[in-house]
Amino acid sequence: MSSAHWHSKDNYRSIWMYLYDVPHEIAYVDAGGIRTRYLTAGDKGAPPLILLHGTASSFETFCANIEAHAKHFRVYAVDMIGNGFTDKPDHLNFAPVYVQHVKDFMAAVGIARASFLGVSLGSFVAAKLALDTPALVDKIVMASPFGRTLPEPTGEPTKLDEMRAARMRIVDNPTFKDVKALLIPLIEDEIDRINDLAAIRQAIYLQPNIAKAMANIWDTYEPTVFNRHALDEVSLRAIQAETLIISCSDSADEFLVNSALYDELIPNSHLVDIKKASHWPHWEQSGEFNAIPCPT
């Protein structure tokens, strides 16, 4: 049975309406001492595909993609260290911290090699993993790609600055209304900012010590800190994994600049553009996104 008729924007949408008839399991595993939350779906014998969310998010961002990708892969959607409902140790989440956590997760669930679908921060982590341990990485999909060397501050706020400020303002009192407003820079069309996604975000923000956890995520984006591990031209040219890049050309921002640059520099890359999307093409235009041929 297919639940595709529920996916129309004219009908009621929720996380559960995308997953209610998709066989899946939500579990926790010890990944290098980090209690790690993940969802898995698809045939156990299929090639593994690991889904990595964006900054301060969780695997629910992929609710509209699980069914389609589980037809071809054994899907693992992971809450990365310091994010979602996975453990949040009190230290800055540099890129190597994320990479080590993904490697520990793969070891914990018995994955020797996988393809990766990463959104924003998740795309950066996948690229860094491909550079750090290429034997673990088959192919990569990078949606709204992130991780490029950040320019020195000019005094003018960047999109990252605005997103950080918005999140840090409400950690002490994460009302549903304020949390839902955080989806505006991520999702262009108001109809796509569904209450379920906001409710999950609010639940994340209501966890103990979330202010410190959020600072440990966002403080790594200060340019002099971030650029120690950023993707410069040399590292982008060194990525050998076959890479599919998903751009959103209706959103003229640094992520669109990254898309063109990554496609130019990564040797084995291919660029697909999705219209009428801002930062979450996998959600905003999930039908078109899911129809892109899987990198098998």
Image (cartoon, helix red, strand yellow):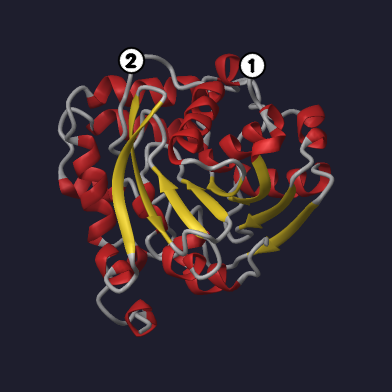
Q: Position of residue 138 (x, y in %)?
A: 68, 47
* Residue 67 shown left or right of residue 292 in the figure: left
**Dot 1, how many residues are within 10 Å of its Cα: few (below 14), some (14-19), or many (20+)?**
few
Question: Dot 2: few (<14), some (14–19), or many (≥20) neighbours within 10 Å?
Answer: few
Circle 1 residue? 228
Q: Which residue type carries mark 1?
A: Arg
Query: Which quadrant does the C terminus fall into?
Result: bottom right
- Across and down, in percent, residue 204 comes to 24, 39
212 vs 223, left or right, is left
Quadrant location of the N terminus in the rendered image: bottom left
* SS label for mark 2: loop
| Location of residue 37 in the rendering, given as x and y in whole percent from the top left corner | 32, 40
> At 50% from the left edge and 74% from the top edge, which residue is drawn?
287
Residue 231 locus on image (x, y percent)? 69, 30
Task: Between residue 58 and residue 22, name the one nearer to us.
Answer: 22
Q: CA distance from mark 1 to mark 2?
A: 20 Å
Pointers 1 and 2 in contact (C-beta within 8 Å): no
Q: Residue at x 32, y 80 (%)?
A: 6
User: Total label count?
Assistant: 2
Q: What amino acid type should be assigned to the residue bearing mark 2?
A: Asp
In this view, 10 is above or below 189: below
Please determine whether, in this image, residue 115 is positioned above or below residue 6: above
The disc placed on residue 90 is 2
| SS for dot 1 | loop
190 w.r.t. 127: above or below: below
Q: Tell me where residue 137 sits by quadrant.
A: top right
